[in-house]
Amino acid sequence: MGIPSNPTVGWHEREATEEPLASALKLYREARALIHECRLEAAENCLAEAQKLVPDLSEAWGAMAAIEQARDNFTKAIELAEKSIAIDSGYSRAWSVRAASLMCTGQFEEAGRCAEEVVRLTPEFGDGWVILSCIQLNLGEMEASSQSLAQAERCDPGGFGVLLQKAELAERQNRPKEAERFLCQAEDSVKTTYEAGRLLLKQAERALGRDELDTAKRLASQLKLNPVFEATAWSILSRTVCGDDRHVLTDGLHAVVQWTRLAPATADAHHLECVFRTIFGEQHCSGPAVTRMYRLATAAADRAIELSPDVADYHQSRADVLFNLARYLQIGNLPSLGTVIKRVLLPHAHRLEVQALYNASVDDYTTALNLYRQQERSEEQWESVVEVLRCRAYSLIGAHRSVEALEDVDELRRLTGDSTALADLRDKLIQHRRW
């Protein structure tokens, strides 16, 4: 979004005749053209040469920010955009990149203020109004978004970015036929490789949102051929996974690992890797492979939390995988896990499961069971009761309280109706001669 649809429309470009500024600006314009053709490394080389000539060239810093944004490295893009703004606070391109990058990290209020600065500085810039419209739409300000989009259309009638946003707005307003029409018009207005990638991305995301998974896969497979959009394409492929058989999960895990490789600063990618590895470890691993898969899942969760420490879902996933690992290793008392949950998870908790998880992690299984049973017996919560019963049985066996453990095993047999799944507990009890 930070890269305008048309690099020659709507911007105040600086001209110079004196050296070395004239040569630096020429290199900068070459870099802009390369960015639009998705040749990011070549563009970086041009900008490096421009910065050698004029180190405080605001245009060069702004273009470097646009490159990082194209790579989904939004934190770096914001940092570079701020450097450009510090040099020249009236440089609209830098404000635009900062607005779009803040929006992509969920900081919509601050992004809106940046977008308003863009249209204040260059009110004739259509894509500036498009960015503002997009931010307002994400904030739920439908009427304001429509007004900004109308202003964008007055500035750049038939522009690619305008048409793409019109399709998004129509989709949000449940007007799918109009959305499809605008996407067709956008396809006719494509002028650069970057625009072609953006269109393909939009079509793939739309198919994914409509549960047209085969279509989304096909479009994402085409999209990953464009190096600028390769990471995003893998993210879409990882979200087309439907089912939990080994082959499907292997494809999903491969896709998400590629996503994290190409976009290492994207917290959602690492979180999804944690989720995939946890499920894979639970259902398709045995022996030492289980421990290895859970430890890799924990490392992925740690990376997600490092990048976005305030997202409660990341802490929940980390706690879940640690609990699974501890359960697999048959550890009865888990004080370190309890500390993790208490410190980082409970402050964000709104559900009884979280408190129950904490009690189970510190070996207070009776309280955990009571908390689970206060909730409606959804399938997921029923499975949690079974798992806590299993954990408590192991703990009771380890404490040489086999009679009580046998009571838990009997309840497990009643709940699951499957004695074969309790073979490990039976073996433990046989060792204590209480079966």
Image: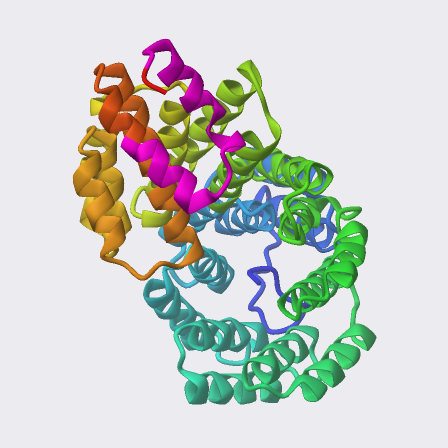
Q: Quadrant of the N terminus?
A: bottom right
- 250 or 357: nearer the viewer: 357
Residue range in magenta is 407-433
- Is residue 86 toward the left or the right of residue 26 in the image? left
In the figure, 223 relative to 47: above or below? below
Query: 218 left or right of 371?
Result: right
The way the protein has been coloured in the rendering is rainbow
Q: How far across and how far down the image is residue 432, in percent?
A: 32, 11
* Residue found at x 53% / y 25%: 293
The residue that appears at 49% across and 19% down in the rendered structure is 291
- Residue 407 position within the rendered picture, expressed as x and y whole percent measured from the top left: 28, 33
* Residue 315 is inside the magenta segment: no
Q: Which image quadrant is residue 13 in? A: bottom right
* Dominant SS in magenta: helix
Exactly how many numbered labels are in the figure?
A: 0
In this orientation, does residue 341 appear?
no
Q: Quadrant of the C terminus?
A: top left
Instruction: Establish if 192 lies above or below 225.
Output: below
**Does the magenta-highlighted stretch encompass residue 427?**
yes
Asked which quadrant contains residue 176, the reply is: bottom right
- The residue lying toward the viewer, choosing from 1 and 50, is 1
Specify whether 292 is left or right of 394.
Answer: right
